[in-house]
Amino acid sequence: MNKVVKPRKAMPTLATLWSGECCPHETECDCRTSGWCPEAKRKQQLKNESNYPMTYLTGCSFAYDHCCCKVLDEIEDLADKYLQQAGISEPPVPIDIINLFDPQRPIEIRPLPLRRFLGCTWLVDKEWVIHLNSNSSPDVTHFTAFHEGFHIICGNSGLAFKKAGERYKKVSERLADYFAASILMPRNYIYELWPEVKSVIQMANIFGVPQPIMSDWLTRLRILGT
């Protein structure tokens, strides 16, 4: 088994933004310089806001659809490190590798018939508890578990988004979705299997993810047309 993953070190751009510094890739990243980032357009007036550096993460949420952002690259690398640590080399990715996300605390997964949410995460005393909606299908639950796992990774690394205010909640959810997609559907697995399978439905079944999520991921990887 490989050495323990250190998420904060593996995501230096996210950690830099969180520490209150401006994005080190501002001049080279399309998210910061192109017309689709509304926060970049308002850069000057935002500089007086206490959370100004965090607004750059909005660019990362747009990047999920439009380009390959440095923060997203680092999230993919982090997901790959966990797969290597767990010795996973093919799909589907087992849910128990979530236990690697915090080496110091146990992580318990509890299915509950939630009314509004697919899942949520709590730190109860010295234990993480992930509540997953028992009314959801197994593939949705599987994806949600890794989404919630990313929140554990960030919280355990001093990058808890809730401290940045409600304004950035959507950004944190997009990054959590990206992590879940990255760890459940690694690019190399997709590129290896798609030429043989060539079916979104079958790929979703092989990887244990919902069909719409597989379709979106294949589109992002430019395997399917937009």
Image (tube, grey):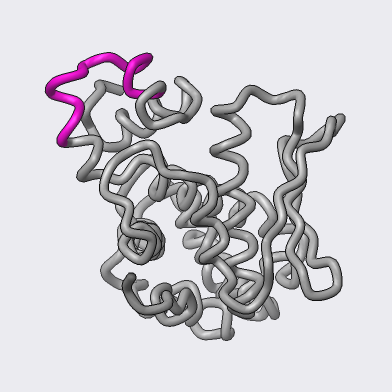
Give the residue drawn at x 24%, y 35%: 190
**Count of number-bearing discs:** 0
Looking at the figure, which quarter contains the N terminus? bottom left
62 within the magenta span: no
Residue 51 in the image: state x and y as whole percent: 66, 75
196 within the magenta span: yes
Q: Is residue 72 above or below residue 157?
A: above
Residue 18 in the image: state x and y as whole percent: 57, 78
- Residues 170 and 1: in front is 1
Q: Which residues are magenta?
A: 192-204
Q: Is residue 182 above or below residue 20?
A: above
Q: Hey, which residue is sitting farthest front in the picture?
A: 1
Residue 49 in the image: state x and y as whole percent: 68, 76
Left-right relation of 43 to 161: left
Looking at the figure, which quarter contains the C terminus? top left
Predominant SS of the magenta segment = helix
Residue 7 in the image: state x and y as whole percent: 47, 74
Give the residue drawn at x 40%, y 21%: 205
Q: Is residue 70 above or below residue 6?
A: above
Left-right relation of 33 to 89: right
Give the residue drawn at x 82%, y 36%: 112
- Residues 63 and 133: in front is 133
Write down the quadrant of residue 111 in the picture. top right
Q: Is residue 188 above or below residue 141?
A: below
